[in-house]
Image: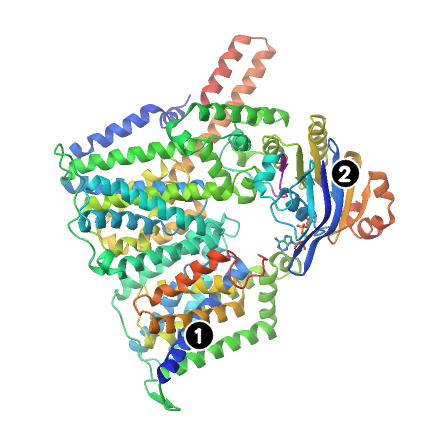
Amino acid sequence: MLKIHNLTKRFGGLAAVNNVSIEFEANKINAIIGPNGAGKSTFFNLVAGAMAPTEGRIEYQGMDITGMACDRIARLGIARTFQTTMLFDQSTVLDNLIVGHRLRTQSRLWDVIINSKRLRDEEKKCRARAQEVLDFVGLSHIGHRITADISQEEKKRVAFALALATDPELVLLDEPAGGINPEETENLAALIRKMVDHGVTVCLIEHKMDMIMSLADKIMVIDHGEKIAEGTPDEVKNNPLVIEAYLGSDEDAAA
Amino acid sequence: MELFFQQVLNGLTLGSIYGLVALGLTLVYGILHVPNFAHGALYMVGAYVSYITMVDFGVNYWVAMLLAAVAVALLAVLCERLVFNPLRHAPPIHDKIAAIGIMLFLEALVQMQWGAEFRRMPTPYTDILDIAGMTIPAQRVLIIAGAFSLMAVLHLFLKKTMTGSTIVAMAQNREGAFLVGIDANRVAMMTFAISGALAAVGATLFAPINLVYPAMGHLLIMKAFVIIILGGMGSIPGAIVGGLIIGFAEAFGGFYISTDYKDIIAFALLVVILSIKPTGLFSKGVH
Amino acid sequence: MSALTKISNFFMTPAMKIAMIVAALLFPFVAGNEYQIYVMALAFVWAIAVYGMNIITGLCGQLNLAHGGFFAMGAYALAILTVDHGWAFWPAFIAAGAVGAILGFLVGVISLRLKEHYFAIFTLCVGFIIYLLLDKWEELTHGALGIINIPAPSGFGLVDFTETTPFYYLALAFMVLSIWLASRIAHSLLGRTFLAIRISDDLAASLGINLMRNKVLAFVLSTTYASVAGALYAGMVRFIGPAEAEVTHTFDMITYLLVGGIGTLMGPLLGTLVITWLTQSLQFLEEYRMIVFGPMLVVLVIFFPKGVVGSFLSWRGRRLAAAHDASQAKEKAASNTSSSKSSAASTQEAGNHA
Ligand SMILES: Nc1ncnc2c1ncn2[C@@H]1O[C@H](COP(=O)(O)OP(=O)(O)OP(=O)(O)O)[C@@H](O)[C@H]1O
Ligand SMILES: [Mg+2]
C-alpha cells in the first residue's frame, strides 16, 4: 500500500530522516518506534505531504506522491492525527467533526450565497458522516459537549474521528496514547484494531511498548533518522541492534 | 563625489539607528516569539524621558540617556510581567493584539501629558566637523560611533557573560533551555530590559537630528520589522546587516530617486523580497 | 426551564432578529436629535468593515493589519471615480467594491504565503504603503488635501441621501445584507473550512483543505467588505483624506471585534455599537480614547478573549450540554421503568436544543 524508497529529510545540517526504505501492507497495523527526536514525526510529515523530502520517493497504491501537496494527499486517502491534539475548543464535539468530510464536497462561495441544493445536500452528508464517525469511536453520547470540557482521552478519540471523517484508506497516528492512563490506552488499542477491521490501514508512532508489542503486525525502529530494524514484534524485540541502540538506552521503553 | 559620501554617511547614520532598534526587537522575538508592536512606543518614551530630563531638569545629555535607558528598561520589564508572560500559552493572535494595546496606550498617555507637537531635542554636540574636506555634523559621528559601540558591548555581553550565553541558548532552543534548568522568567525579563534600553539609547542618539513627537515610533517600528524579516527573525547579525541595508537603500533612494517616496523604499523592498522568498532573505529554512 | 435559560434561548431565535431589525428601523424616531442618527449610521458603516475583518481574522485566524487601508481604498476609489471622472455614484460604488476585491486578491496571493507573525507584519507594511500612496500620489489622490465634494448616493429622485435619516436606512440595509452574507458563510461548510484553518494550518491541510485557495477567498471577501464600507463612508461624510488610511482605524476595528467577540456572528455589530456609543458618551475621551482602549485590549485578550458574544455562547453551550446530560440520565431512569413515551418526548426536547 505504501512504499518508501530511500527517504531523506535534512534540516540544515541535521538529517532528521536518513535514507529510510520500507513497505507497509494494507489492512495491517504498522508501528514506528524510536527514541525522542529520532525523526518519527518528521517521517509522518513527509508521507502526509506536510513537508517535501530532500531525497527519496514515496509511493502510495502504486502512485508516486513524493512532494505532492498535503491537501491532495489527504484527498487520495491518507489521513493523520497529530502529536498534540488540535481541536476547536469553543464549539461542540460534533461541530468539530463536520469539516472532516469537507474534502469530499464541491460547494463553493456561490453555493453559499444562493444556498444551493448542492450545498444543502453536502452539508447533510458531512453532518451524517460526522455522526457516523462519532458513533464509530464510541463518543455519540458527548457529541453535544463543548470540546474544551471533554477529557484528554476523549479528545484523542475525537481526533481519530476527524481523521476517519475524511474517508481514508491509510491513517497515520502520531502518539495516540501520549498522556493517557493504561486502562484508556487499552481501550484506544481496541479502537485502533476496530479501525483495521473496517478496512483502514493504520500506521502509528508510539512510545508505549506494551501497546505496540500486542498491537502491531510490523514494526519499524528508527534512531537518529535511520532505520535500524524492521519486522514482527518478536523479531524486533530480539534484535540486538534495537536492544542496544534503543531499548537499552531508553528508560521509558524498559518500563 | 562629495555628495556621494554624504549619502554614505546618511546611510550609515540611519542604518546604525535602525540596527539598534531592530536588535531589541529581534532579541525579544528570538527568545519569546513575541512580535513586539509596542517596541516603537518604547523608543518614543525613551526620547521623551531624555527630552524632559534635559529640558525641564537641566540634566546632562549622557545622564539623560542613562536615565532613559533605565526607565524604558523597567517599562519593558513591566510589560513582560503584566502582559506577555500571562499570554505565553495564548493563541498567537493574542500577544500581537496585546502589544498593539500597549502601544496605543503609551502613545495616548504621552500625548495627553506633553501634547502632540513636535519638539527638538537639544544636544551638546552641535559642531560641524571637517574631515578630509567633508563637512560632518558631530551628532552624526556620535550616532554612528555610539550605535556601533553599543552593538559591540551587546555582542561581548552575549558572548562573554553567563547571563548573555543563557539568552543565546534560549534563543536557539527554548525547550532545551528549560531542560537544562535555565530560569526562563529571568531570561525573559532580562531580554525585555535590554531591548527597552537599546530603544531608549537609540532614541536619545537619533532624536537631536530628528524630532520628538508621540507618533515618532510608528515608522521606525515598521522599518525595524522589515529589517528583522530581511535579516531573519531572531538573528542578531541579521538585524545589524538588515539595518544597514535599509539605511543605505533609503539614503541613496531618497537622494537619487525621490525624497517623497523614500519611506516607501523599505516596504517595497520587503514586498519584493517576500514575494520571491516567503521565509526572508537570510533564513536557513529552520523556524 | 429557568428564566435565565428562557432569555438566553430567546437571543437565538428568529424573533430576536426581527426585534433587532424593528428596533433599528424605529431608532430615528426615538433618537433625541439628528446627530445621534448620524452617529448610528456611521457605526453601521464601520460595522460592515468589521464584519469583513471578522471573516479573515475571526474565522480564518489571520490578523490582517491592512484592513483600514482597504477601507480607505474603497473610499478613494469612489471619490476619484465620481469627483475626477464624473461617474455616477452607484457605478462608482460597484467599481469601488471591485477595486477592493482585485487589490485584495493581489495582496492576498503574496501575503498569505506568510504565516502568523510574518503575515501580520507584512499586512501592517501594506497598510502603510497604502497610506503613503494616498498621501504622496498627488495626481491621483489629491495628496494631503484630500478629496471634497463627493456626491451622496443617488436616490433616483425618490429619496435624498444627503439627508441623515434616509442615509441611515441605506446604511442599515447594507449592514443587514452584510450580516446576512456573513452568517451564510459562517454557518456553511465554507465557514467551517475557514475555522479549520484558524485552528491550525497543518490540521486543515491534513483534512484535505487547500490552504491558499481558502485563505485568499477569505481575504478577498474581507477586503471587499472593507472597500464597500469605505465607499459608503465616502458617500456619507462627503470628503476624505489620507488620514482615512491611518493604521489607527485598523486598531479601532480590532477593538470592536475583540469587545464583541472575535469569530462570532453578532460580535462585530455589538462591539462596534458599544464602543462607538461609549466614545460618544465620553466626548472628552475622543482624542485620548486609547488611554482606555489600549489597556482594555490587553485586559480583554488576557482575561476575556472571547468577548461578550463569545462568552455568552460558550456559557449557553455549557448549559445546553448539561441540560442534555441531565435529560439523558432521566431518560435512562425512565426507560428502566419502561416508559417509552416520556423518553421519546425528552429526546425530542434535546433535539430542539441542539
Ligand atoms: N521543522 C523543523 N525544522 C528543523 N528541525 C526539525 C523540524 N522538525 C523536526 N526537526 C528536528 O528533527 C529531529 C526529529 O524530530 P521529530 O519530531 O521527527 O522526532 P520524533 O521522533 O517525532 O520525536 P518525539 O518522540 O519526541 O516526538 C529533531 O531533532 C527535531 O529537532
Ligand atoms: Mg514526534
Please give the label number shown on residue B16: 1
Name the secondary structure under disc 1: helix
Q: Is residue A184 left or right of residue B2?
A: right
Whether discs 2 and 1 lie on one chain: the answer is no
Quarter that holds the N terminus of chain B:
bottom left
Q: Position of residue B280 (x, y in %)?
A: 51, 60
Horizontal and vertical percent position of residue A61: 69, 35
Q: Is residue A98 above or below residue B271?
A: above
Q: In terms of image quadrants, where is residue A75?
A: top right
A121 left or right of C226 in image: right
Q: Amino acid at mark 1?
A: Ser
Nearest the eye: B216 or B185: B216
The percent position of residue B270, horizontal first and vertical second, equals 44, 61
- Pick the residue in front: C10 or B93: B93
Of residues B148 and C34, the one drawn nearer to the viewer in this rendering: B148
* Kind of element beneath mark 2: helix
Q: Nearer the viewer, mark 2 or mark 1?
A: 1
Disc 2: which chain? A
For disc 2, the marked residue is A212
Q: Amino acid at mark 2?
A: Ile
Q: Is residue A98 left or right of residue A58?
A: left
Q: Would you say residue A5 is visible in this rendering?
A: yes
Question: Residue under mark 1: which chain is it in?
Answer: B
Residue at horizontal 50 percent and vertical 41 percent from the top: C197
Rate crowding at label 1 as few (under 14), some (14 to 19) or many (20 or more) other CA atoms within 10 Å.
many
Examine the rendering and report whether any part of residue C306 can be seen: no
Q: Residues within 10 Å of mark 2 (few under 14, many from 20)?
A: many
Q: For marks 2 and 1, give the CA distance.
A: 58 Å
In this picture, which residue range is highlighted in magenta?
A77-84
Q: What type of secondary structure mainly makes up the magenta span?
A: loop
User: What's the residue at 83%, 43% (across, down)?
Assistant: A236
Q: Which residue is at a point 58% across and 61% down the rendered structure image?
A: B284
